[in-house]
Image: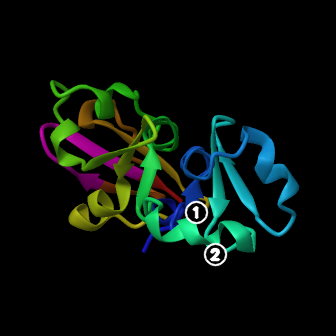
Amino acid sequence: MSYLPNTLNSYWLWREVSSKLGVSNPAYKYWKSTPNLKLNNKYLFIQKNTLPQKHQHIENILTDLSGHLPIKYASDRLHVSEHIFSYDRMKLHGEFEYKFVEDVKFVNIKKFFVEFGIKVNKNSIIQLGKIKDLEITSNSTFYNLKNEYGLVVYE
């Protein structure tokens, strides 16, 4: 499976963790054995199975984000407007599955990539858009999607 859809497979959304525990926002900074990941300088995630022992009891009620990405981060990585994930009238909106966690909208990128057979290496550049707007080069892989849209992976 491609790297991008697996970004959050081993992470919890910090906003959900802090809400369920009732701890202050910067509490994670004092948990030295709990690695974190920040996306877009906006979303903070805490690695699974590394919460301090007294807080591990909440892990079974946290939302699994495997295959999901926040829509802002996904739009940045796919070089496409965030509107594609935000509005029903966008032609590809219905091709994605969504979930909300603590008012953060996530898109299931893994399911989308699997359905269209898209493979992406860690350092690849991905562009999603209307076929007429995409630049297809000799060192890229083109995926024809639906409704005049395509995706190009530049190696």
Quadrant assignment, res 138: bottom left
Q: Which residue is mark 1?
A: 11
Residue in the image at 76% along x and 63% along y:
35
Residue 70 numbered mark, or none: none
Q: Where residue 148 appears, x then y in whole percent?
A: 16, 37
Choose mark 2 or mark 1, whichever is in front.
2
User: Where the N terminus falls, by quadrant?
Assistant: bottom left
Which residue occupies the foreground of this view, 134 or 51? 51
- Per the image, label 1 sits on a secondary structure element best described as strand
Magenta region includes residue 98? no
Magenta region includes residue 146? yes
How busy is the neighbourhood of tag 2: few (under 14 within 10 Å), some, or many (20 plus)?
few
Residue in the image at 58% along x and 71% along y:
57
Which range of residues does the magenta coloring cover?
143-152
Amino acid type, label 2: Asn
**148 over 144 or under it: above or below:** above
- Residue 121 visible in the snapshot: no
- Per the image, label 2 sits on a secondary structure element best described as loop
Answer with mark 2 or mark 1, whichever residue precedes in sequence: 1
Which residue occupies the foreground of this view, 126 or 3? 3
Residue in the image at 17% along x and 28% along y:
88
